Image: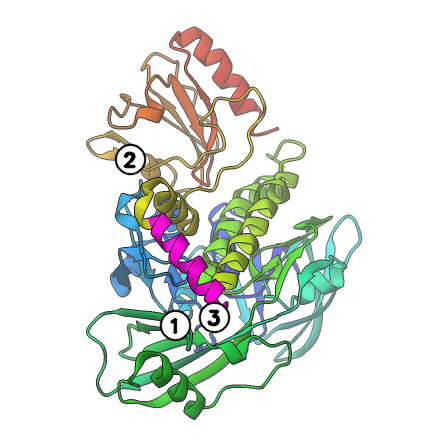
Amino acid sequence: MKADVVVVGGGPTGMWLACELSLAGVSTVVLEQRRDVDPHSRALTVHPRTVETLALRDAHGPLLAESGRLPSGHFAALDERLDFSCLDTDFPFTLTIPQARTTRLLEQRARGHGAAIRRGHRVIGLADDGDAVRVSAEGPDGRYCMAAEYVVGCDGTRSTVREHAGIPFVGTDFSTIGWLGDVTLADPPSAPVVSVWSRNGAVMCVALPDGQYRFVGNAPEDNRTDWPGEPTFDELRSLVVRVLGTDFGMHTPTWLSRFGDTSRLASTYRKGRVLLAGDAAHQHMPNGGVGLNVGVQDAMNLGWKLAATVSGRAPDGLLDTYHAERHPVGADTIEHTQAQTALMTNFSEQGVALRKLLGGLISECPQLRDALAERLSGLSVRYPPRASAHPLVGQRAPDLRLSEDVSLFGLLTRGDFAVVDFTGGVPAAPGPKLVWHRAALPQERQTWSGIGAALIRPDGYVGWASDESDPTTLARELERAVAATRT
């Protein structure tokens, strides 16, 4: 058995990568050891940049239709919420939707594009021989082997792919523990989110789409390095009452679990023909619900590069830019989740003072508030450009309105590069995987004023831009930029 790419792990990261690869015509097989989607969803939050990521392929509609919307986020559960309405996006909110449902929607899309999804198949070994990767797996009909040009581990923090590839997973063990519980409430709160932090502990309550409520929290006694086992319903109720003063009539728990603040980062996201994405590449405390989002954005960055490599269109070194661009994002994610953990789990007088000080700064300094909101939403990610590049290069491109019925995201739905000519005079030269569009400059966006033309990557980041206004000069610059994207 053969495939261009084998994706190991069928969570949101693996499924979105399968969507991207199969959209590009790459034969893709997803091996997932679970026979069905895990009904217990640690992740509930889809952030603005992830909604944009799906919108780049016109895949966001089903999630929007089924999700709750929160117009704000939090940093370390501070009382001062971060206002997402100020964000430069068409989706200034977070979605609340169980990870299980997100996975099912993305799996449906991947199958529709032709990806083969094999559930109940466990990878037990792999070997990169330089020309291909040999994957050993075990399925319902027994053991088998298959060959692939590349294998991507999207199989979580205990990644079998990472282990067999010999990629170090470097970081720190847990020093504090959180817990969660999904329950039914006889007397639920009126607000969709309740968040309280005190010296007695921290509790957050979030309404789920299925009518249940999720409680997440921790207490001073949870700052420990030994594992106490799974929580009981009585423990959950006791802490909620201690912090909130009521249990809202909670009953019928469907899931109780603990998690720690173990933080690790793969030393490399690529080793030969083996790559890592999502939790297989980075592990951290789930503060702010960023994990699923960073994983899907890993897959978006990797998908078009891997597809171009498999098809023979990629210039030398393109696949290596996946690590160069996404490894720093993983490191940054660990940094800010660790910072939040320090704020959330310090129940001393010093901790109270620190939270009061930072909360006050967020209220008093709009720039700090907005910077934190952009960071948590994923909209602040910028990839390092060449030294001589235009300032827009490496930045995320917003969904520019190019005409009455055309927007930038609409040009990218098939995973192609897009050239936008703002002068209207550059000779059009569309080609394979390249969409060409002439448009007037969007007057409402100051950072784009004066741009002569721009090349937008399939993942929605600016690959090249120029302030040149002469069509002949622009054409030469653009020709070089386009040539750099393919062999």
Q: Quadrant of residue 354?
A: bottom left
Whether residue 111 is visible to the viewer of this picture, yes or no, is no
Circle 1 crowding by C-alpha within 10 Å: few under 14, some 14–19, many from 20: some
Circle 2 crowding by C-alpha within 10 Å: few under 14, some 14–19, many from 20: some
Amino acid type, residue under disc 2 in the picture: Ser
Q: Residue furthest front?
A: 349
Label for residue 407?
2
Whether residue 472 is visible to the viewer of this picture, yes or no, is yes
Numbered disc 2: secondary structure: strand
Question: Where's residue 328, x and y in %?
Answer: 59, 45
Q: Is residue 60 left or right of residue 462?
A: left
Question: Where's residue 140, x and y in %?
Answer: 61, 80
Label for residue 347?
3
Q: Residue at x 41, y 53 (%)?
A: 358
- Whichever of labels 3 and 2 marks the residue nearer the N terminus, that label is 3
Question: Where's residue 70, x and y in %?
Answer: 27, 59
**How was the colour assigned to the protein in this rendering?**
rainbow
Amino acid type, residue under disc 1 in the picture: Ser
Q: Is residue 187 left or right of residue 474?
A: left
Instruction: Please give the range of residues in magenta.
Output: 344-362
Q: Is residue 466 left or right of residue 360?
A: right
Q: Is residue 162 above or below residue 482?
A: below
